Each structure stands twice: as structure tokens, then as C-alpha cells.
Image: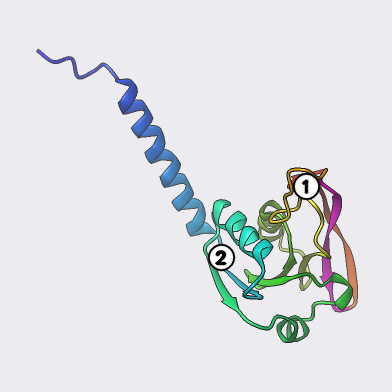
């Protein structure tokens, strides 16, 4: 007689893998799609897109001129970076960590969106093994106001 009540290591591993896949799918279903516009030759933008996907977002990428889009969406020049995304009715400018975007979508503050100006070392997509990560602000911006939404060091909240 076969003992079917005993759990094998393989069954546990397969069950855990299925649970992780299901959790990722469920999380992705709850997140809005991120529409990213980037320059076709930008490698750090591709890494940022990969960061979003790994964090559960579905991402659609359009390659082309980004500056006209930034102007149309109201991104201030001093907050501009190398790519622009639209997520859940907000603008996301630059190397904003997925955790900050998720918080934005939960809290729904009044504003146009979030920005990480420039390209801080260690921010998602800007990881460099030989460099110490920067500490940087994720800025919540609107047409006539802005504030620090959160602060990160590299890819982690500071």
C-alpha cells in the first residue's frame, strides 16, 4: 500500500513554486499597466523596465522622442530624467523605485506624479557594482507644488 499522506520534498518545492507564481499573477492583476516611453538606445531604461516587471507590473514600452511627452504631461524640466511612464493616472519620471510607485497607487495623493531627477547611482536601472549607491528623494510633483514623497538609498527606502 502507498502512503499518500507523506509529503515529499519535490511536492513541497512544486507547491511553493506554484504559490509564488500565483501570488505574482494575482499581484500583477491588481496593478495598473505601466506605459513607458524611452529613447531606443537607452540601456538603463531597459533595466528600469525590468525592475518594474520583476515587481509585478505589466509594462508596455514605446520607443521614441520623450521630451514632447514630458512637456505634454507637465513634467518640470528640473525633474526630468531619461524616461517617462504613465501608471494609474500618474506620471512617473525617471528611476523611481517600484515600491514608491506602489505606495503612490495605494495612497493616491493629489499630484501629477513622482520623479527621481537625474540618474542617481544605485537607483533601479542605475546599479553599478563598483559605486556606492546615492541617497535621493522621490519627489511628488504637481503644476504648482512639489514635496518629498519618500527617500531612497539605492533601491531601498532610506
Quadrant the N terminus occupies? top left
Outermost residue toward the front in this view: 130
**Label 2: how many Cα within 10 Å (few below 14, some 14–19, many 20+):** some
Q: Residue at x 60, y 78 (%)?
A: 63
Q: Secondary structure at mark 1?
A: loop
Quadrant the C terminus occupies? top right
- Across and down, in percent, residue 140 comes to 82, 64
Span highlighted in magenta in the image? 133-143
How far apart are the two marked residues, 1 and 2, measured between alpha carbons? 24 Å
Outermost residue toward the left in this view: 1
The answer to whether residue 38 is above or below residue 154 is below
Q: Secondary structure at mark 2?
A: loop
Q: Is residue 142 magenta?
A: yes
Tag nearer the camera, 1 or 2: 1
- Across and down, in percent, residue 57 comes to 55, 59
Q: Quadrant of residue 97?
A: bottom right
Q: Which residue is mark 1?
A: 154
- Across and down, in percent, residue 7 comes to 29, 20
| Position of residue 15 in the picture relative to residue 35 (left or right) | left
Q: Which residue is mark 2?
A: 32
| Most foreground residue, 10 or 32 | 10
- Across and down, in percent, residue 65 comes to 68, 83
Q: Quadrant of residue 9?
A: top left
| Position of residue 116 in the picture relative to residue 61 (left or right) | right
Amino acid at each position: 500500500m502507498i502512503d499518500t499522506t507523506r509529503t515529499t520534498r519535490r511536492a513541497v518545492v512544486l507547491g511553493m513554486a506554484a504559490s509564488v507564481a500565483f501570488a505574482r499573477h494575482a499581484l500583477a492583476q491588481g496593478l495598473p499597466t505601466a506605459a513607458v516611453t524611452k529613447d531606443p538606445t537607452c540601456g538603463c531604461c531597459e533595466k528600469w523596465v525590468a525592475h518594474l516587471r520583476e515587481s509585478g507590473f505589466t509594462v508596455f514600452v514605446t520607443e521614441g522622442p520623450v521630451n514632447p511627452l514630458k512637456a505634454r504631461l507637465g513634467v518640470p524640466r528640473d525633474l526630468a530624467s531619461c524616461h517617462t511612464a504613465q501608471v494609474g493616472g500618474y506620471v512617473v519620471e525617471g528611476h523611481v523605485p517600484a515600491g514608491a510607485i506602489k505606495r503612490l497607487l495605494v495612497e493616491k495623493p493629489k499630484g501629477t506624479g513622482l520623479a527621481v531627477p537625474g540618474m542617481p547611482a544605485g537607483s533601479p536601472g542605475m546599479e553599478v557594482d563598483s559605486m556606492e549607491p546615492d541617497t535621493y528623494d522621490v519627489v511628488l510633483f504637481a503644476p504648482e507644488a512639489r514635496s518629498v514623497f519618500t527617500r531612497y538609498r539605492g533601491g531601498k527606502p532610506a
